[in-house]
Amino acid sequence: MRRLIALLSFVTVLIVSAGCSETEIRVAPYDVVMLPGQFDFGAVAVGSELTIVLVLTNQASGTAEIGNVTLGGAGGGHFVLPESFDGDLGGSATRDINLVFAPQAEGYWEDVLIVSIVNNDDPDVVEVPIRGNGVTTALRAYPELLDFGPVPEDDNEDLDVTVENLTGVDLEIWGFEIDGDEDGFSVDDPIDFDVFPWVVPANGTLELTVDYEADDLDARDAGLTLLGPDGNAWGPAIELRANDCEGSAHPGWDNDEDGVTQCAGDCDDEDPLVNPGLPEVPDLLDNDCNGLTDDTTELYDDDGDGMSEAEGDCNDDNDTTYAGAEEIADGQDNDCDGDVDEGTTADDSDGDGYTIPAGDCDDSDATSYPSAVEGEDGIDNDCNGLIDDTTSVYDDDGDGYCENEVACLGGWTIGDCNDGDDQAFPGNTEVVNGADDDCDGIVDNGTDAVDDDGDGYTELGGDCDDADPATFPGAPALPDARDNDCDGVFDEGTVNTDDDGDGFSENGGDCNDSDAGIYPGAAEDYYATAADLGDGIDNNCNLVVDEGTDWYDDDGDGFSEVGGDCDDSDVLYSPAVWDPPGDSTDWDCNGSD
């Protein structure tokens, strides 16, 4: 608000009441602004600093007396004003103001640069918001991992890494540290630098080359940290790895290019047909690297009975089954001759694939055996001890009803519509559960879960009047003194309600029921930035904008007070009227007779 008042004080022509019918005209002496009007330093590394220049400008012709230029103090000491300024700032004059952001800790920091002006009726200030981001991770490297892969003894490899400056200031690298298994790793000087410091430009990059010379074949893992002028780390360490197969994705570890490295378990890295995860095939190779050759194939004796499938074992998962084995009563073709249990007490007499020891409850009936489909034939087909269970003539859920519409077993009643639910049968009481409890073909009829008025909502679904199809959750509100959308409020959003809370609805004359400052009888300059200036809005809903304010042409002569009319109640006074010389009256409102 102070800045708005300050801007208003810079209006070129001001009208000051002199306590009589005449007015005093004076010109505002100065118009002081700071350019830019706000500034963001962006990211600056903790421990470094960035200086910018703001320009204090007097845009008017008169001299401004500057009391001082200071910081508001909210920045916690992260912003520095090297020198202040006070004294006169002449018309159209400028003054450079240096401002420094020197973050001492990580985080976003904000402050206000304040210019105090003292030669005004009311002392004024110009405020410039400033902010900056202190960062500890000033550099980022990619790739973050330099994997040299397998390097032969007495050989060397080099890899490039890009170092990116995440801040808005140049950063100097004054050294580096290699921690861990550092033997063999080194960093070359960049192309543009023979000695330290190496400079990474603001928001720019620097290319580095890291070398590894292998004195032996031992695995090496280390971290490369780039250091600032005080020995501080500019960012996280770059991971260095050489001759370390574990977890490495370097293509040098996959000689046969089968997608699996030696460290990932490839037991023959010269043969692409061998690696963990490949299916075993009968080729006299250990394809899946599990230490066994041709296991799970027809060439391998999987059950250890001395015979593979290729040699005549008809079930290589059972060590009692192979060509020439003794037949026993176990439901298996032990001797692999195509007959099961022949010559034993467990012979399958009815040929249904099951013997009595194997669970056949009637070995004279080929339709009765374990896992057979139960039929409506009065027989225990699946040998579970129940006759015709799971069929329509059986009461499976025990509610006294079967599904059949003609007859049931065991004296049960016909007509069960859901024989898997003992709460669903003819004549049962319907409850709200989404099921047809009484088997009449209608779900939840007679309950609050039924949509009686056909509007798509039930009482359980939120319908507050299930006898009215125009009343349901989400229905449009109508001006009918009813809760159409079931939210507990009547007529909201219609012409009958006072939506903005100013005491008037649209039917009550409110011409904008979304703005509490607009209603019949409201002050016409309700939203004006200063008294009598008007706000360009018909606040009192009389179809006239800003009447009675300095912006309105009350006498209809084409000029308002703001437009220069010195008497807006009389059409004889306006800047457009000719003023005869020497008549002692200021007809044209120019401040003289």
Image (cartoon, rainbow, N blue to C red):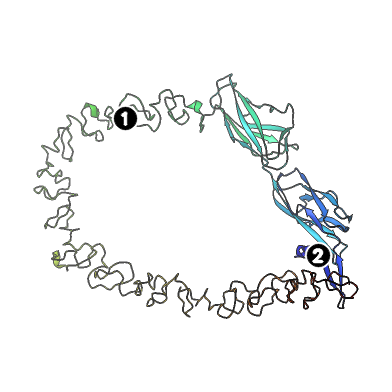
Q: Residue at x 26, y 64 (%)?
A: 421
Q: Nearer the viewer, residue 305 or 273?
A: 273
Percent of width and height locating residue 443:
29, 69
Percent of width and height locating residue 17:
85, 74
Q: In this image, 73 relative to 455: left or right?
A: right
Amino acid type shown at disc 2:
Ser
Q: Which mark is residue 9?
A: 2
- Decide which of tag 2 and tag 1 comes sooner along the chain: 2
Q: Nearer the viewer, residue 591 or 133?
A: 591
**Quarter of the figure with residue 347:** top left
The quadrant of the picture occupied by the N terminus is: bottom right
Percent of width and height locating residue 10:
81, 62
Q: Residue at x 75, y 38 (%)?
A: 230
**Quarter of the figure with residue 504:** bottom right
Q: How many marks?
A: 2
| Mark 1, residue position | 295
Percent of width and height locating residue 582:
91, 73
Q: Nearer the viewer, residue 575 or 381?
A: 575
Q: In this image, 204 relative to 309: left or right?
A: right
Q: Nearer the viewer, residue 293 or 418?
A: 418
Q: Badge 2, how many Cα within 10 Å: few under 14, some, many 20+?
A: some
Amino acid type shown at disc 1:
Asp
Above or below 532: residue 186: above
Q: In this image, 246 relative to 426: left or right?
A: right
